[in-house]
Image: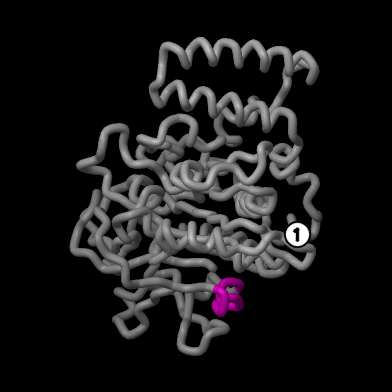
Amino acid sequence: MLKFLGNQTGGRFCDGISRRSFLQIGGLAMGGLSMNQILAAEQKAPKATKSGGLGHKAVIMIYMPGGPPHQDMYDLKMEAPREIRGEFNPIKTKVPGIEVCELLPRLAGNMDKLIPIRSIVGAKDRHESFQCLTGRLNERQPAGRWPEMGSALSETQGSTSPGMPPFVALSPRMQHRPYNNGKPGFLGGAHAPFKPMDDGKDDLKLNGISLDQFNDRGKLLRGFDQFRRDVDNSKTMEGLDAFTQQAYGILTSSQLSTALDLDQEDPKVRARYGKGTGKHQGDGAPRLNEQFLLARRLVEAGVRCVTLSYSFWDWHGSNFKHARTNLPDFDRAMASLVEDLHDRGLNEDVTVIAWGEFGRTPR
């Protein structure tokens, strides 16, 4: 299931343009899908079978930093004067009565699998990922700060297997710091995401140490941990213990490294997603289409929550030119992910949500 989020608010942001809020605030809600619903669905989920299904529920969250222009994507204002509604034309979709931008033909063909949502309110007009990743406002926070949803799932559900972290963040470090994400908040470091695009990938290597030597080092670490437990009962110590256990499981298993190896993917499937570009766009993220494929491989391998950041949408001018560059790549990557999940029988177990911190009005 794919959800585009957007709704009218009265605020204005850095360029004076009024915005549309992209997020419902409160309780880690995601467009009406709340944490307790995810956990309840997890309990009811059947075990994985050869005919499809994961045996656990998973979420792929695609953050579009900067505020994607929904009025040029899936909410075109065709009844408005041309100077208001813009230069793009709508095209029909697979669902009668729903039209989208002409630059999104593959999503149009998959509209029976998608849900555009235009009725969500309560967010603040801020260039930051916090609201999208936590479902809360970045103010009046408890000690330690609110955790991201992936960290909450890590705390409540844990790993599906010793070799897979429950939460993986594919977002690279971005120039505009409030766009960055991957914070566990008051849940502590034990529930921080694994970040293969940041510093995490080096942790997958044994660096010349044999498995036997690693096991000996594991005994040494456990000895230190026991000593520290005697003098430190804080969340930090708890996090270190959990990190040690998770690192041990990852280093002695090939599950995660295999999921991250796109060379093991069917070349035809990989080509369908396209590549995009690894160059950072503006002060946001690269436009890496293959991260959508990585996300599918990770949830299929057992990760409960995968987050990624895609491109840069705070254009401040030449909007239609930027849309012609970004929307076709987004259409290709997102449609491929949705089709892939359905083809593999994973659509009942994986929720995909694409959003930015707000949308835009024509003027």
**The N terminus - image quarter:** bottom right
**Nearest the eye: 203 or 360:** 203
Q: Is residue 16 above or below residue 338?
A: above
Q: Residue at x 77, y 67 (%)?
A: 51
Q: Is residue 194 above or below residue 248?
A: below
In the drawing, does residue 168 fall left or right of residue 90? Answer: right
Q: Position of residue 325 (x, y in %)?
A: 53, 58
Q: Amino acid at mark 1?
A: Val
Picture quadrant of residue 87: bottom left
**Nearest the eye: 351 or 224:** 224
**The C terminus - image quarter:** bottom left
Q: Residue at x 73, y 13 (%)?
A: 216
**Nearest the eye: 212 or 301:** 212
Dot 1: element: helix
Q: Confirm whether residue 318 shows in the render.
A: no
Q: Position of residue 285 (x, y in %)?
A: 49, 44
Structure colour scheme: one colour
Name the dominant secondary structure of the magenta segment: helix
Picture quadrant of residue 34: bottom left
Picture quadrant of residue 362: bottom left
**Nearest the eye: 122 or 126:** 122
> Where does label 1 land, which residue?
269
**The magenta stretch spans which residues?**
106-113
- 108 part of magenta stretch: yes
